[in-house]
Image (cartoon, helix red, strand yellow):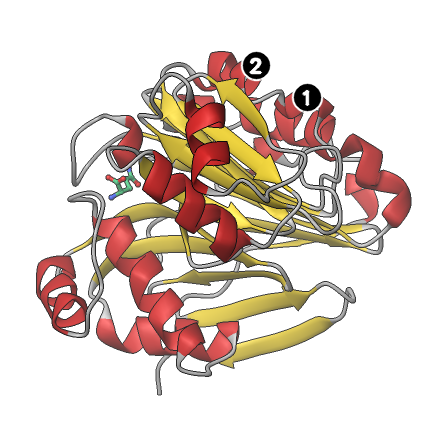
Amino acid sequence: MCGIIGLHLRDPELQDQLGSLMTVMLQGIIVRGPDSAGVALYGDTQRVPDGYAAVSMLHAPEGLAEAVAGQAPDLTDLTVEQAGETTVVAAATDPDQLAKAVEAAAPGAMVIGQGDDSVVYKGVGHPLELAKDFRLEEATGWQGVAHTRMATESAINAEGSHPYAVGTGLSLVHNGSFSNHASIRRELQLDGATFDSQNDTEVAARFVSARLDAGDDLEDALVALGKRFDGFYTLLVATNKGFAVVRDEIACKPAIIAEHPRYVAMASEFQALAYLPGIDEARVFEPEPGRVYAWRREGALTGASECRT
Ligand SMILES: NC(=O)CC[C@H](N)C(=O)O
């Protein structure tokens, strides 16, 4: 099991409702993943104003704000939000600078996401309780993804919760399990990647991140993933530019997409989409096995690319 939702808003007038729409969607996937949950929100300018960065972390120590300020005295507008197990540090700087200051200030903590337009939360517990911790209902923005987990490949802890947010603005959520993740992990480690968990999904996130760093666009990175990873998967991958969905060639993990002039929504099950505004007019379809579907922020369907030849 495991449940995935994603909402990519084309109509700016819906942006104030991103969190309330996602909260309703989340209720449709709780049954698929009752042990943990996480979200990534894009364009919530209350949480990450223009010109600011946010770094999310687990295991943050007491006195983090003072410690970060001590590491980077020039940082302005430093805030620290505690949201269950996730701590979000924001400041008027860029994500790399902030992540460096946070890592120096809290070497025992684990960075689980950094962005200048995105913020990540995750933890263990009932998804609706976690959604309260994350203040999901009040979130705004142009895109969000969420996950409810039923663990298969690593322990039930916050490190094993999705999304896996690697690099700036990339968030990946997964339903399924990869059968060759250990060997791909070793290859990525030889190339210098480091890992925070034993989870198979983290391997996919670091693989996609490495491809994006090497110059691939998101569609190409997911086509490459389809060629390299074995196992079962529906993946939803979000970046600062948009999001993409891909399923393996057998496609036993469910997925449904609703394309509407005002939004693109994706979920593991239709019931998560059923209450979206105008759903009756949406084009609702099941993504084909082995194909990448991607949407960019401008709102245009970029088309579906073959995952395997
Ligand atoms: N049930 C699932 O889809 C699990 C996803 C992933 N393999 C994990 O354990 O986190």
Q: Is residue 182 left or right of residue 208?
A: left
Q: Could you say which disc has been placed on residue 132 in the image? A: 2
Residue that appears at 42% across and 25% down? 64
> Which residue shows up at 34% across the image and 78% down it?
224
Q: Is mark 1 within 8 Å of ligand 1?
A: no
Disc 1 element: helix
Residue at 42% from the left image edge and 75% from the top image edge: 213
State the image coordinates of residue 55 (x, y, percent, origin top left). Answer: 49, 41
Q: Answer yes or no: do the residues labelled 2 and 1 have beta carbons within 8 Å?
A: yes
Give the answer, above or below, for where 218 lies relative to 257: below
Q: Quadrant of residue 17?
A: top right
Image quadrant of residue 145? Answer: top right
| Residue occupying image coordinates x 23% and y 74% | 228
Residue nearer the viewer, 29 or 66: 66
Left or right of 141? Residue 135 is left
* The N terminus sits in image quarter: top left
Residue extending farthest to the right is: 13
Quadrant assignment for ligand 1:
top left
Residue, disc 1: 137
For badge 2, the amino acid type reads: Lys
Give the percent coordinates (x, y) of residue 23. Answer: 63, 24
Residue 209 vertical position relative to residue 276 in the rendered view, above or below: below
Residue 192, horizontal then vertical, whole percent:
19, 69
Residue 78 in view, yes or no: yes
Q: Amino acid at mark 1?
A: Glu
Tell me residue 184's x, y (percent).
Answer: 15, 67
Compared to residue 35, the image places residue 233 above or below, namely below
Q: Could you tell which of marks 2 and 1 lies nearer the N-terminus?
A: 2
